[in-house]
Amino acid sequence: MKFGIFLAPFHPVGQNPTLALHRDLELVSRLDELGYDEAWIGEHHSAGFEIIASPEVFIAVASERTKNIRLGTGVSSLPYHHPLMLADRMVLLDHLTRGRVMFGVGPGALPSDAFMMGIDPQKQRDMMEESLEAILQLFTSDGVVNASCDWFQLKDARLQLRPFSKPHMEVAVAAQVSPSGPRLAGRFGLGLLSIGATSIGGFDALSSHWQVMEERAEKFGTTVDRNKWRLVGPIHIAETEEIARAEVAFGLHKWVEYFLKVAALPLAPDTDDPNKLVDALNSSGMAVIGTPEMAIKRIKELEGKSGGFGTFLAMSHEWANRENTLKSYELFAREVMPHFQSSMDRLIDSRNWAAENRPSFIGAATNAVMAAVQSHYAEKSSEDKKQ
């Protein structure tokens, strides 16, 4: 299993936005050092909380500060862009990052964004499908691409650059609860980005989503791969559950309030009591606020419900202050990730083997030391006699 983050980002209104954005860049750099595999960057244009307007610009900066971590748009809202312009920008990023970029797509999450652009929310999913079909043709076609619908046209269109990645960078479609994301991913044989995997509705839909993927893939003659399925869920861990609970009192209530009153997603009760919020989020399975063992258990539950997936993405948030947030990510890398990556198996086997055979090893070592001592004194005695 691989691991990463989904960085919307979530920054409460009332703090310095410039510092918040640079804190996001610092986080991605730190995750690169800790060995995380991926970071997905969101696109939003209103509501004051999720303040990255262009994931492509952010990725360009982050790529210069990192070495290994892959960087994806999480997600590019396709109805907001002409497909030629977005395809061109993604191919440019593919070259600039030498293949580290990924392309996450969706219809657009905030109704307020669509409203400002005069986009009918009822049409966004159809627009996404029309755009994605055109973009994939632009990525792969050797000739020109022509397409026309009620919101964009392509006339003898082609990209100047071929993608750096072959045949193009990895593409993943966002999914919440409805089957529209899995239907589209299955049609084109793409990855799936289950953003609401730990919500009640999203968790219940995991197995049916993959069934939709397989049915659509069979219908359209494509293939789908569970290793390209990513599940997203919020986590904050510490050495003990009590410490984790105390740390999230810093900002958890602001995050919940945003979803209740702005994003209109009732994820927890309308209360400022951090303990009640933690109880609600932990008991529903929406989040893990506690220990590494609790995080391991929840990821195993997601494995069982989904039937298997390739990457777990921690939903980035600022429930705790900067120091404790970074500690949580480090603790996750140190104690959670190895359980799903087989990186401890041989170490444990080697330790157990050494412990089980310790008497014979120690005995042999002791005998060797004694033999060396005896040899030394025998040699010294022989030399003394000669003198």
Image (tube, rainbow, N blue to C red):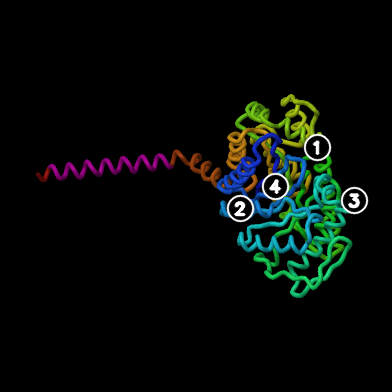
Left or right? Give the position of 161 relative to 262: left
Along the polypeptide, which appears first: circle 3 or circle 2? 2
| Residue 282 image position (x, y, % from top left) | 74, 32
Along the polypeptide, which appears first: circle 1 or circle 4? 4
- What amino acid does circle 3 point to? Gln
Q: CA distance from mark 4 to mark 2?
A: 13 Å
What residue sits right under mark 4 in the picture?
Answer: 52
Above or below, 142 relative to 174: below
- What amino acid does circle 1 point to? Val
Along the polypeptide, which appears first: circle 1 or circle 3? 3
Above or below, 232 relative to 63: above
Along the polypeptide, which appears first: circle 4 or circle 3? 4
- What amino acid does circle 2 point to? Val
Indicate the quadrant where residue 331 lies: top right
Left or right? Give the position of 219 relative to 275: right
Left or right? Give the position of 4 relative to 352: right
| Residue 189 image position (x, y, % from top left) | 78, 61
What residue sits right under mark 2 in the picture?
Answer: 61
| Residue 241 image position (x, y, % from top left) | 65, 29
In the image, is residue 378 part of the stretch drawn in magenta? yes
Q: CA distance from mark 3 to mark 2?
A: 34 Å
Q: CA distance from mark 2 to mark 1?
A: 29 Å
Magenta residues?
A: 361-384
What residue sits right under mark 1 in the picture?
Answer: 262
Counting other residues with Cα less than 10 Å from the Cα at mark 2, is it few (<14), some (14-19), or many (20 or more)?
A: few
Q: Secondary structure at mark 1?
A: loop
**Residue occupying the point 66% across, 40% down:** 17
What residue sits right under mark 3 in the picture?
Answer: 122
Q: Which is more foreground, mark 4 or mark 3?
A: 4
